[in-house]
Image: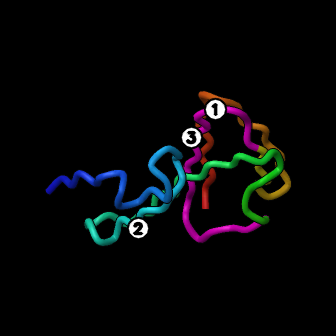
Amino acid sequence: MAHVIERDSWAESPDRWKGELQCGQFGANSCLIFNYQEKIGGGPRLHKHPYAEIFVIRSGTGHFTIGDQEIKATAGQILIVPR
C-alpha cells in the first residue's frame, strides 16, 4: 500500500524544508530528516548512526565528516553515507 504524507504532518514550518518523518508507521524501515540551515556554520554536532544516510543538497553547500574523510557537497549533489 502506498502512502501520501502531507507536508504539514512533518514540516516544522510551511515555508522551510525542515522536519522529520519516522517511516516505521508506514511499514518502511527508514527515517526522513529534512534540515534547513539558515546560519552559516550551523548544523548538528558530529555524530554517527547505525544505518546509512542519504543527503540531498538542494541549495548552498554542506560540509560533512565521514570517518577521516572531509566532504564539501554542493547544490544538486547527493551524498550517500554507508553505516
Query: In this orientation, which residue lies closer to the viewer: 39 or 80?
Result: 39
Q: x and y percent of residue 45 in the render?
A: 78, 65
The residue carrying mark 3 is 56
Query: What is the spatial separation of the Cα atoms under label 2 and label 1, in whole angstroms?
Result: 24 Å
- Nearer-N-terminus badge (3/2): 2
Quadrant for residue 28, please give it. Answer: bottom left
- Residue type at tag 2: Gln
Q: Is residue 79 magenta?
A: no
Quadrant where the C terminus lies? bottom right
Front of the two marks 2 and 1: 1
Front of the two marks 3 and 1: 1
| Element carrying mark 3 | strand
Quadrant for residue 11, please give it. Answer: bottom left
Query: What is the spatial separation of the Cα atoms under label 3 and label 1, in whole angstroms?
Result: 9 Å
Which residue lies at the image location 53% right of the left edge and 46% below the top edge? 16
- Residue type at tag 3: Val
Q: Which residues are magenta?
A: 46-62
Which residue lies at the image location 26% right of the left edge and 66% below the top edge? 26
Q: x and y percent of residue 78 in the render?
A: 59, 37
The residue carrying mark 1 is 59
Which residue lies at the image location 73% right of the left edge and 36% below the top edge? 61
Q: x and y percent of residue 72 in the render?
A: 78, 38
The residue carrying mark 2 is 22
| Element carrying mark 2 | strand
Which numbered marker is on residue 40? none
